[in-house]
Amino acid sequence: MKMTPAMIVLERALAAASLRQRTIAHNIANINTPGYKRQDVSFASKLSRALGLEPRLPLRRTNPAHLPAAGLDINPEVYRDNSTSMRNDGNNVDIEREMVDLVQNTINYNFAVQQLNTRLAMRRYVINEGRR
């Protein structure tokens, strides 16, 4: 089955939400580890750039075979937040922030699943109606 660009973005969003879930759980597990720096996942800024929501130099395609799937090469990456320190031992994990991030990530994941299910349901409908 050929995936549309929207389905590819939704698939990547689900992968990012899954990675962010594991990262948040890792942060919470290390809340009392001296010197631990929290980690986060960068995906939203990459997605904005890929969707053209951030200003950038536009590319012009002279042939449809050039630059395949340009803009859809968005993969989540884990980075370490070294900018703050919550305690004297160097740990910067804030449980309240992690819980808010966890709730927001759950909402984003459920939204992506719902959108992907809707797109797949439309395809199933077209396939089943074609058999009558």
Image (spheres, helix red, strand yellow):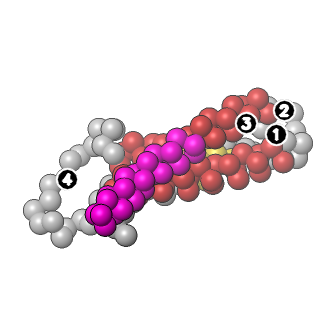
Which residue is under mark 1?
Answer: 90
- Dot 2 falls on a residue whose secondary structure is loop
Residue mark closest to the camera, 2 vs 3: 3
Query: Is there a contact, CB below 8 Å, between mark 1 and mark 2?
Result: yes
**Residue 62 position within the rendered picture, expressed as x and y whole percent measured from the top left:** 10, 62
Residue designated by label 4: 59
Q: Please report contact status of discs 2 and 4: CB closer than 8 Å, yes or no.
A: no
- Name the residue: 31% across, 59% down: 129
Q: Give the quarter of the image for residue 61.
A: bottom left
In the image, what residue type sits under mark 2? Arg
Depth check, mark 3 against mark 1: the one in front is 3
Alpha carbon distance from label 1 to label 2 = 6 Å
Confirm or deny contact between disc 3 and disc 4 (CB under 8 A). no
At label 3, which amino acid type do we have? Glu
Name the residue tied to disc 2.
87
* Mark 1, secondary structure of its residue: loop
Provide the secondary structure element on which disc 4 rests.
Answer: loop
Q: Circle 3 is placed at which residue position? A: 98
- Distance from disc 2 to disc 4, alpha carbons, whole Å, reads 47 Å
Region of the chain picked out in magenta, as a range: 109-132
Three-letter code, disc 4: Leu
Q: Say few, some or many: other residues with alpha carbon within 10 Å of mark 3 (under 14 / 14 to 19 / 20 or more).
A: some
Cβ atoms at labels 2 and 3 below 8 Å apart = no
Compared to 7, does 2 lie above or below? below
Q: What is the crowding at mark 4: few (fewer than 14 residues within 10 Å), some, or many (at least 20)?
A: few
The amino acid beneath tag 1 is: Gly
Q: Does residue 119 show up?
A: yes
| 7 with respect to 91 (left or right) | left
Is residue 119 located in the magenta-colored stretch of the structure? yes
**Helix, strand or loop status at disc 3:** helix
